[in-house]
Image (cartoon, rainbow, N blue to C red):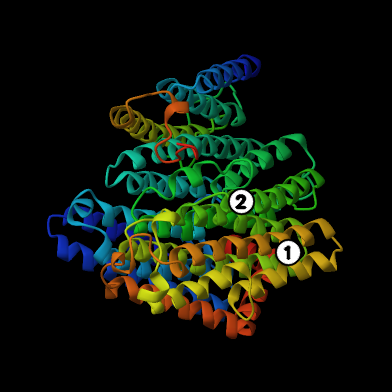
């Protein structure tokens, strides 16, 4: 299972990098989204993939049973997903705004803040 | 509970100022009042840490390493205090610079959200929380960068957002791997558990991921391109705040993580830091020399100065670390002040393009003198604070006979003088291209006051350097011997 997960992570990173290098702002942001999913899978894999019981505490006991799953990596991933979602929304809104203001989504043509010396 | 205030105050401020933004005057002065409260919280915290050594608080009653830990040693406390100083300076400056529309778009609330993120990052004792505070800081800075809504800002923000998000993802992956290796996220606990495992591949991979992430936040070579693309685009208040705090949080995180969790004497890490620092210094200063825009020159100088701080960390001797910490403090004050002056100069001369400005020395001699203090300090001219900062770093390099670093540090200092004299000649000395009457208006008091206060602080740090070096020495000892820090977090066992 770890091998499959590692390959999937690698695939996501490769696809993300490919999109990000294409020079188009929308593709760049989609690439970032893929990359952020890859990062979440890294946490998931690093937290160990094991078959285990749900980490619930039975009634009348103070701690979960033996062999309960570790819930912490999932908690980290959930936090990361929420944060990533917020950032992704902002990035999309910004991309729309930048396209509207600058008239292009090609990143090589976005030179208003850093004009060429000769122009 | 003294540790909570520097985070609670700006968070409460951000919420209130957002809700009340209909009342513009109230929100402006409220913003200043909350900044003063933050400064006060910083003073109290520093006082406590100076007296009792590192202090820690476990939130929610969960014992470390399971709960969320806030912890302050002298470095953290001093950083919080200096954040308070910068907060007061920029909010007062913003009283005149930020207009009603920008206030309505949330400028004041976002400033305090950013401050909450910065203080949280300085005080947290948990690496995942460090990630969260970085995100708070990042999203607030995104907002601040686009308040105003000009084309330039949209362009700058695209690069800022795009490149910072990559660093964020590297940070997150590094934290995930660290958890996989050590099974804990508490930084003090991580330090203990990774003892003797520093050369393991997984540890090195996580270290390099974090190095990349913090390096990008600190604007190190070759991952600094977001900074000169964006820092000159928003309001001066915003760029002064950014220039003072954002990159320095990156440097702080580098210092914290590479002394507490990782060992610096792993050759891979040390050589990346060392050569990265030298290239950062050189590339930053050369980039500045090529610019002809007031704030863009200053932006490139942030990069080159970051190189000095990282160099201090990379050399890894107590003397060098002392230099890095002293540099950190001096630089925040000086850089914020230079950006504020750039804003005042733009108001007087109508432009930030050097060839379109001039005549300020004749028209506003006080502003000219106030520029010279931080400019000379940045270049390292005695007896100003920058001289001592550079002296400590170069001295540490000489002790190690690391000639490359010494030559780079001295050469970059000379080129800094070149850039500062370029600004002096173009903005202050030469006559204004549209004649002497083109210099309009007076510097309003809310702009002048923070500039004067920060200039005085620069003079004080320079003239009473002994006191500040002694304090930095204590901070260095706590950083290099983190036993007291670990004991404060985990208890005495």
The quarter of the displayed image where residue A11 is located: top right
Callout 1–callout 2 Cβ contact below 8 Å: no
Residue B375, given in percent of the width and then of the height, sits at 53, 69
Q: Nearer the viewer, residue B347 or B427?
A: B427
Residue A106, given in percent of the width and then of the height, sits at 43, 23
Secondary element at tag 1: helix
> Which of the labelled discs sits on residue B284, or is there none?
2
Q: Residue at x 65, y 80 (%)?
A: B470
Q: Nearer the viewer, residue B333 or B78?
A: B333
Residue B93, given in percent of the width and then of the height, sits at 32, 67
Q: Nearer the viewer, residue B93 or B290?
A: B290
Label 1: which residue? B410
Q: Residue at x 76, y 60 (%)?
A: B316
Residue B206, given in percent of the width and then of the height, sits at 66, 39
Above or below: residue A109 compared with residue B40: above
Residue occupying the far right of the picture? B401
Would residue B59 be visible to someone looking at this image?
no
Q: Residue at x 52, y 53 (%)?
A: B247
Q: Residues within 10 Å of mark 1 (few under 14, many from 20)?
A: some
Q: Residue at x 61, y 65 (%)?
A: B417
The quarter of the displayed image where residue B178 is located: top right
Above or below: residue B441 compared with residue B69: below
Would residue B49 be visible to someone looking at this image?
yes
Q: Residues within 10 Å of mark 2 (few under 14, many from 20)?
A: many
**Chain at tag 2:** B
Left or right: B274 in relation to A96 = right
Above or below: residue B403 compared with residue A78: below
Above or below: residue B49 compared with residue A76: below
């Amino acid at each position: 299972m770890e091998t499959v997960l590692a390959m999937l992570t690698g695939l996501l990173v490769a696809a993300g990098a490919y999109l990000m290098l294409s020079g188009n702002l929308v593709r760049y942001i989609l690439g970032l989204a893929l990359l952020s999913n890859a990062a979440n899978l890294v946490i998931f894999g690093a937290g160990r993939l094991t078959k285990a019981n749900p980490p619930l505490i039975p009634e009348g006991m103070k701690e979960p049973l033996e062999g309960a799953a570790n819930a912490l990596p999932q908690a980290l991933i959930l936090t990361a997903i929420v944060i990533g979602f917020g950032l992704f929304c902002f990035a999309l809104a910004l991309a729309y705004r930048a396209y509207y203001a600058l008239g292009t989504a090609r990143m090589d043509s976005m030179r208003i803040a850093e004009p060429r010396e000769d122009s | 509970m003294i540790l909570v205030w520097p985070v609670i105050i700006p968070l409460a401020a951000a919420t209130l100022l957002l809700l009340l933004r209909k009342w513009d005057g109230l929100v402006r002065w409220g913003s200043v009042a909350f900044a003063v409260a933050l400064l006060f919280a910083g003073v109290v915290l520093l006082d406590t840490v100076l007296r009792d050594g590192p202090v820690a608080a476990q939130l929610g009653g969960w014992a470390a390493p399971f709960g969320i830990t806030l912890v302050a040693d002298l470095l953290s406390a001093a950083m919080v205090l200096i954040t308070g100083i910068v907060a007061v300076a920029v909010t007062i400056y913003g009283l005149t610079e930020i207009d009603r529309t920008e206030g309505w778009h949330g400028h004041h609330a976002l400033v305090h959200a950013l401050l909450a993120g910065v203080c949280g990052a300085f005080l947290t004792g948990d690496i995942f929380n460090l990630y969260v505070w970085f995100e708070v800081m990042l999203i607030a800075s995104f907002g601040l960068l686009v308040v105003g809504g000009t084309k330039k800002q949209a362009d700058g923000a695209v690069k800022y957002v795009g490149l910072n998000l990559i660093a964020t993802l590297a940070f997150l992956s590094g934290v995930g791997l660290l958890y996989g290796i050590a099974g804990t996220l508490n930084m003090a606990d991580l330090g203990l558990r990774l003892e003797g495992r520093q050369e393991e591949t997984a540890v090195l991979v996580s270290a390099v991921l974090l190095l990349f992430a913090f390096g990008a936040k600190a604007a190190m070579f070759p991952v600094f391109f977001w900074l000169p693309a964006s820092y000159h685009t928003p309001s001066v208040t915003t760029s002064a705040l950014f220039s003072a705090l954002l990159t320095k949080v990156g440097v702080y995180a580098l210092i914290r993580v590479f002394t507490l969790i990782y060992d610096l004497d792993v050759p891979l890490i040390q050589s990346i830091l060392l050569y990265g620092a030298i290239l950062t210094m050189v590339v930053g200063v050369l980039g500045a020399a090529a610019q002809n825009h007031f704030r863009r020159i200053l932006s490139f100088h942030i990069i080159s100065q970051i190189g000095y701080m990282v160099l201090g960390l990379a050399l890894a001797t107590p003397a060098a670390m002392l230099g890095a910490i002293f540099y950190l403090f001096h630089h925040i004050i000086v850089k914020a002040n230079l950006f504020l002056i750039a804003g005042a100069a733009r108001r007087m001369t109508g432009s930030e393009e050097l060839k379109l400005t001039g005549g300020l020395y004749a028209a506003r001699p006080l502003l000219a003198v106030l520029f010279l203090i931080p400019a000379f300090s940045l270049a390292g001219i005695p007896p100003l604070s920058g001289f001592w900062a550079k002296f400590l770093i170069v001295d540490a390099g000489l002790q190690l006979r690391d000639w490359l670093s010494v030559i780079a540090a001295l050469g970059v200092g000379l080129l800094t003088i070149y850039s500062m004299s370029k600004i002096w000649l173009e903005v202050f000395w030469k006559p204004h291209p549209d004649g002497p009457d083109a210099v309009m208006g007076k510097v309003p008091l809310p702009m002048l006051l923070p500039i004067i206060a920060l200039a005085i602080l620069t003079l004080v740090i320079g003239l009473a350097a002994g006191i500040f070096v002694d304090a930095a020495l204590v901070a260095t000892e706590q950083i290099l011997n983190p036993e007291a820090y670990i004991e404060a977090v985990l208890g005495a066992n």
